[in-house]
Amino acid sequence: MKSKTKRTLAAVGVLGLVGVGLAVHTGTGTPSAWGIGDIAAICPLGAIEAAIASRTIVPPLLIGLAIVVALVVLVGRAFCAWGCPVPLLRRVFGIKECKDDRPTAAERDGINDSRNWVLGATVLTTAAFGFPVFCLICPVGLSVATFIALWRLFQFSEITLSLVVFPIILVLEIVLLRKWCHRFCPLGALLGLISRLNRTFRPTVAEASCLQRSGGSCSRCADVCPEGIDLHHPEHSVSLAECTKCGECKDVCPAHAISFPLLSRAAKPQRDTAQVPSECDEGVVVVAER
Ligand code: SF4
Ligand code: SF4
């Protein structure tokens, strides 16, 4: 099964979990409602906004945030490819990404990363208004809210404005702001910052199998990567911290040379240049950390 199909099933499963939350009345049915007791599996950005808006930090919020941070350290930005409803909706609406839409290394360079500015604005507006303003337009939240509104329509015949307003905003964002994920998403920016600590399940190339390393002209893995990552030239490409573990590179590799090991040689801290494989590398291409 191709990773795209698996990702579609995973994203549908996330919405299914929201449905389970609604069906068994474990809370409001939002991602924040999953968890044990008062410890909610909350959106990390939503948690930070809630703390800033209320000027209160309560232990359950901190514990929920710590759990999410631990997950991001373990699997990086995997949520963006596997759990976020936005890519799912893009596929539903048949919106394809152009190669020009992909970020470049320069655009992901700290202050040049427009997502970081949106993240900063999200925090500042929350502090200024005492309310999580960004949540009003967050496509992830709007997707879940639309799902909940539909659920209530079918379960309670409840007709509200949410049934119209949320989907309209959502469709406008997804159709008109095609570059949302790469240019605007503050959640992606936050996950990208945390996932700099991620050292597991990183895409790793087996040198012995790779056609490029044996003198061929293959660059399919770099060409297909939606995040602009080139596993062979990390010094010129977007950082591996932005990898969403989508698996597209693995799917297109004609030599089946890419895997996602729990730990790879790439996991070791290295200098900020590409590493030349040594005889000790046993056929594993060492990808530089950035
Ligand atoms: S490196 Fe591979 S798994 Fe990571 S984002 Fe790019 S295509 Fe997806
Ligand atoms: S797609 Fe596979 S064979 Fe081609 S350059 Fe990438 S790792 Fe090597």
Image (cartoon, helix red, strand yellow):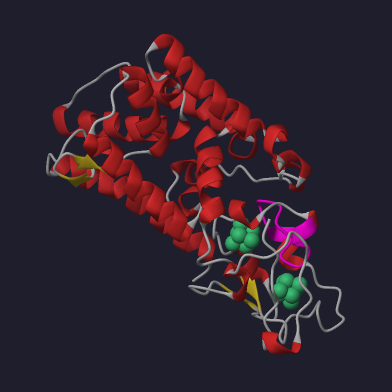
Name the residue: 29% across, 49% down. 16
**Placement of 268 over or under 224, stated as above or below:** below
Give percent across and percent down for residue 254. 70, 78
Q: Quadrant of ligand 2?
A: bottom right
> In the visual, does 133 lie left or right of 119?
left
> In the visual, does 105 lie left or right of 87?
right
Give percent across and percent down for residue 270. 67, 65
Decide which of 246, 89 is in the foreground and name it: 246
**Placement of 114 over or under 10, stated as above or below:** above
Q: Quadrant of residue 184?
A: top right
Residue 225 included in the magenta stretch of the image: yes
Name the residue: 12% across, 44% down. 24
**Placement of 70 over or under 173, stated as above or below:** below
Give percent across and percent down for residue 28. 20, 33
In this rendering, the count of numbered labels is 0
Decide which of 67, 160 is in the foreground and name it: 67
Please identify the dominant SS of the magenta region.
Answer: loop
**Placement of 240 over or under 265, stated as above or below:** above
In magenta, the rendered stretch is: 223-235
